[in-house]
Amino acid sequence: MKLHMQTGDITTWSGDGIVVNLFEGVLTPDGAAGAIDKKLKGLLSKLIKKGEIKGKLGGTVIVHTLDKLSTDRVCVVGLGKREEFTLDRARQVAANGVRALRDAGAKKIAAVVHGAGAGSLDPEAAAQANAEGIVMGLWQFHKYHSDNAETKTLDEVTLLERDASKIKVMKEGVARGEIIAHATNLARDLANEPGNAATPAYLVEVAKGLAKKNELELIVLDRAKAKKLGMGAFLGVAQGSDEPAYIIILRYWGAGKDAAPGLGIVGKAITFDSGGISLKPSEGMQDMKGDMAGGAATLAAMQGIAQLKPKINVTGIVPATENLPSGKAYKPGDILTASNGKTIEVISTDAEGRLVLADALVYATQTLKLSPVVDAATLTGAMNIALGAVRTGVFPNDQALGELVFEIGEATGEKNWLMPMDAEYGEAIKSDWADLKNSGGRPAGAVSGAMFLKNFVGETPWAHFDIAGSVGLFSGAKVSGYKNKWGNGTPTRTFINLALRLASKK
Ligand code: BES
Ligand code: MN
Ligand code: ZN
């Protein structure tokens, strides 16, 4: 799909369909919807009065123009209540509008930039949000359906703005939005790939492609190199799998090699989590192909950052392995030594995420001296119990970083919530035989996971994102706005925006 931003009048535009909008409770449409209503001889206002077009947030109604316009269909998308309108709502309705026309069979469509007119948002920010919503909202994953005859796709979406003086900044907004949304879609593609395709070696190939295309530095640590670095926690998890395991490192040098090492982004990539010897129940186990969603978001964020080119250095680190039972697999009771020398008693081989992250975080903070460091992981089922799919639980050891991340979440719609890390929560992961144990039991399970990770970051400002609920791996979620139902790319946009925000501060 090609996305254009141009000056033009939507009432004379010709193609398969156009998208206009309406706030809830408005009886006489103005702006673009008003102009279209006039050309349709009051059809829209009639449907509003009959209650068929309500303007409810995200609702779409398609009417046929029957040759009264040079376009076949008009989609009216609801903006919800005027006083509740936000940038993220612009993203959501932009997605719903284009998707409704796509599903109706349109190929070439135009849309107004929701929020730029009546919503009175900043035109550049509105254009960016609309582009993000459109590109994310049109994402589909049909790679493994052999019959794609029914699959509908759009060829072209044109965003139209009447005021030519705004077009320059709006084009910039659209370009930024496209980069951010395509990065998010990459994270979704990777998460949705099955475990037999998206192996650790496959993620290395993806990273190679990203490095080549975006001029990133690539470092790949295989088992032998990880062993030299003393990464006993990562290797403990990997030892039950016959697939080669890797720690993938992508470096973007936006501030140059003489500047500070910069931001570190670490992402858990268990390409399939069976639980290992502490085997998971078989029901729902297929969703654990998505246990690499944090790593997917990390690779994707590196693509987005490399394309947006902020003046900051950023390094992505992705520990990638399967977690399987076998005659060689690590066992409950085993004691592993991580690369910072800390010993870990294995209580559950299903608490593997924190083990692979431990060595990756030591590498990020001690070896590469990255600061601040964030990590994303589908770490605990308990996180889903606590916050569900609506918000990511974020565990910061640094208040300013936590607040920044929270603020970014409110703006991007990848909503975060700051979680506690009182020292008392650390009691649960003390071991009788080693420095730590890898499970603190059920109470506050997401917090004890974060407390475990805290042992591997030293004094570095850090924030852990437990995306087990928010990335949508629990089957049954619905498509909503620009969000797909499974493996939604969270927190790719947060990480990209964090890099942009940290760069603009300097
Ligand atoms: N990958 C899982 C957590 C998960 C479950 C994410 C379902 C998304 C959907 C993780 O490795 C895990 O198994 N965690 C254990 C930790 C426990 C043994 C301390 C859990 O949550 O039960
Ligand atoms: Mn597990
Ligand atoms: Zn896992």
Image (tube, rainbow, N blue to C red):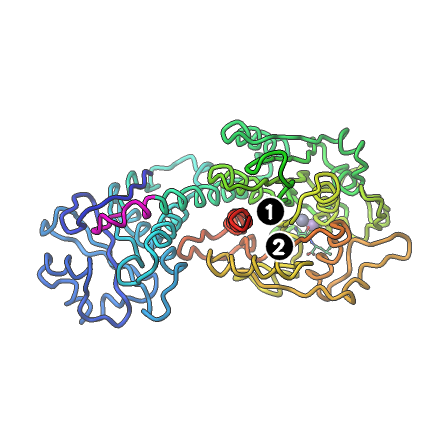
Q: Secondary structure at mark 1?
A: helix
Magenta part of the chain: 159-171
Q: Would residue 220 appear left or right of 329 to someone viewing this image?
A: left
Q: Secondary structure at mark 2?
A: strand
* Tag 1–tag 2 contact (CB < 8 Å): yes
Q: Which residue is mark 1?
A: 294
Which quarter of the image is occupied by the N terminus?
top left
User: What secondary structure prevails in the magenta region?
Assistant: helix
- For the residue pair 40 and 373, the one nearer the viewer reads as 373
Which mark is on residue 220?
none
**Few, some or many C-alpha atoms within 10 Å of disc 1 (few <14, some 14-19, many ≥20)?**
many
> Residue at point 83% right, 54% down?
436
Q: Distance from label 1 to label 2 (Cα)?
A: 9 Å
- For the residue pair 288 and 376, the one nearer the viewer reads as 376
- Ligand 1 shown in quarter: bottom right
> Residue at point 72% right, 36% down?
241
Q: Amino acid at mark 1?
A: Gly
Q: Would residue 39 appear left or right of 280 to someone viewing this image?
A: left
The image position of residue 454, as x and y in percent, is 74, 54
Q: Is mark 1 within 8 Å of ligand 3?
A: no
Q: Residue furthest top?
A: 212
The image position of residue 273, as x and y in percent, is 67, 45
Q: Which residue is mark 2?
A: 465
Q: Is residue 31 above or below residue 360?
A: below
Q: Amino acid at mark 2?
A: Phe
